Image (cartoon, rainbow, N blue to C red):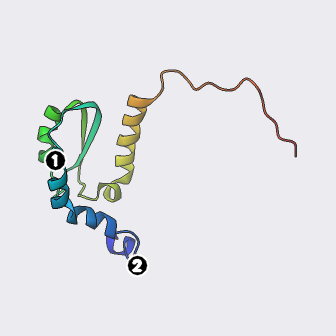
Amino acid sequence: MYARAFAGGSGFRGPINWYRNADRNARLFPQIGERHLELPCLMITAEWDWALPPDLAAGMPALCSDLETHLIRECGHWTQQDKPDQLNQLMADWLIRRFRPAQPPITPSVKISVAA
């Protein structure tokens, strides 16, 4: 499935380059991971992720004042491809709960019609 999805120059180069650049990013931005975050954070981990195992997130509560965590079971590193429905549901639910306006949107009182 992955070979077919990324065959023919479909965009796999960008994700790989992010990993290739990890050492440079660490040199340029050594403070990343040290500053306490004072904003809503969502951490979704994957049970079978060998690159970023869930236990790596153990220190996140100390860095995030408002953290919600979820574990997707029977899922590997490519979460958005392995379990897209579950990942999307977790993200959408969190966004709606955390950022939905308290008031319904204002609807205009003037009707606009277009003549055919």
Q: What amino acid is at disc 2?
A: Gly
Choose between 93 and 10: the one closer to the eye: 10
Q: Who is closer to the viewer here, 31 or 18?
A: 31
Q: Position of residue 31 (x, y in %)?
A: 16, 44
| Quarter of the picture holding the N terminus | bottom left
Residue 101 visible to the viewer: yes
Q: Earlier in the sequence, mark 1 or mark 2?
A: 2
- Left or right side of 78 for 10: right
Q: Residue furthest front?
A: 28
Tell me the element at label 2: loop
Can you identify the residue that label 2 sits on? Answer: 8
Q: Give residue 81's position: percent from left, percent from top.
A: 34, 59
Q: Residue at x 16, y 47 (%)?
A: 54
Q: Secondary structure at mark 1?
A: helix
Q: Position of residue 23 (x, y in %)?
A: 15, 60
Q: Residue at x 78, y 29 (%)?
A: 111
Quadrant in the picture for residue 69: top left
Query: Residue at the location (39% across, 50% down)?
Result: 85
* Residue at the disc numbered 1: 54
Q: Give the foreground label among 1 and 2.
A: 2
